[in-house]
Image (spheres, rainbow, N blue to C red):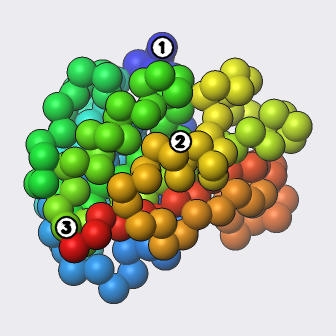
Amino acid sequence: MWDERYASEDYRFGTRPNRFLVDCVAGLNPAKALALGEGEGRNAVFLAGLGFDVTAVDQSAVGLAKARRLAEMNGVRLHTITADLNDFVIQPAAWSLIINFFCHLPSAQRAPLHQRVTAGLVPGGAYVYEVFSPAQLQLATGGPTDRDLLVSLEEARRDLAALDLRVGRELVRYCEEDDPSTLRMAVLQVLAVKPA
C-alpha cells in the first residue's frame, strides 16, 4: 500500500520537517537518532542536517529510496532499514532520540512498540511523537477513520508511563503549520524523556 502511495516523483508530505519536531530538538546535542515509520525521510533528513546519526525505518522500500535521494540532495547521510515496525528490534539503551510521526498502529501493536521505544532510549533520551487524535474523526480532513488507530493523551500517558512527559497535548492545527488556508487537523503531540 505505502509503496504505491510513495511511487510518484513528488514528496507526498513535502520535504520540510514537522514543526513540532523542529521545536522539540532545538538545543539538543546531536547524537544517535531513530526515525520510526519515516516514509520519504523529511524528518530524518532534517535531523541529519543538524548532525544527528540517523537511522530511518519504514515498511516501504520505495519511501526509503526517496528518503535516501532527499538526503543526497541535502548533502547528508542516512541509514535506512526496510522493516515492519511490529518486527523491528529496537536496540535497548542505544538511542538519544526516537521520533515517530503519523505512523498509526492499532493499540494492540502500539503499546508493545512504545515499550520497545522506552527500552531503546538512553537515560535522558527523548521520544518525539505526533499522530492524529480521536477528535480527527469529527474534523474528517484525512487520516485514519478507525478509532483504534487514533491516540488520546490518556492513552499515550498509559503507553509511555515510564517516561516523563515534558509535552503532552491534544490540539487542532493547520496541516501546513504556517498556512491557515490549509486543512485543520486534530493531533496528539508528545515529548517524553527517559529519566536519567
Instruction: Tell whether 154 sits left or right of 100.
Output: right
Q: Amino acid at mark 3?
A: Pro
Q: Callout 3: helix, strand or loop?
A: strand
Q: Callout 2: helix, strand or loop?
A: loop
Q: Callout 1: helix, strand or loop?
A: loop
Instruction: Tell whether 133 sits left or right of 92.
Output: right
Q: In the rendered image, which quarter is residue 89 located in?
A: top left
Nearest to viewer (mark 3 / mark 2): 3
Instruction: Tell whether 185 sits left or right of 104.
Output: right
Residue occupied by mark 3: 123
Residue occupied by mark 2: 102
Percent of width and height locating residue 14: 52, 49
Q: Are marks 3 and 1 in contact (CB under 8 Å)?
A: no
Is the residue marked by circle 2 packed among few (<14), some (14-19), or many (20+) residues within 10 Å? Answer: some
Q: Please report the residue visible at 70 percent of the width from the left and 57 percent of the height from the top.
A: 170
Q: Please report the residue visible at 31 percent of the width from the left and 28 percent of the height from the top.
A: 85
Residue occupied by mark 1: 1
Query: How far separated are the C-alphas under marks 3 and 1?
Result: 36 Å
Query: How far separated are the C-alphas under marks 3 and 2?
Result: 25 Å
Q: Which of marks 1 and 2 precedes in the sequence? A: 1
Q: Amino acid at mark 1?
A: Met
Query: How far separated are the C-alphas under marks 2 and 1?
Result: 16 Å
Q: Is residue 12 above or below residue 149?
A: below
Is the residue marked by circle 3 packed among few (<14), some (14-19), or many (20+) residues within 10 Å? Answer: some
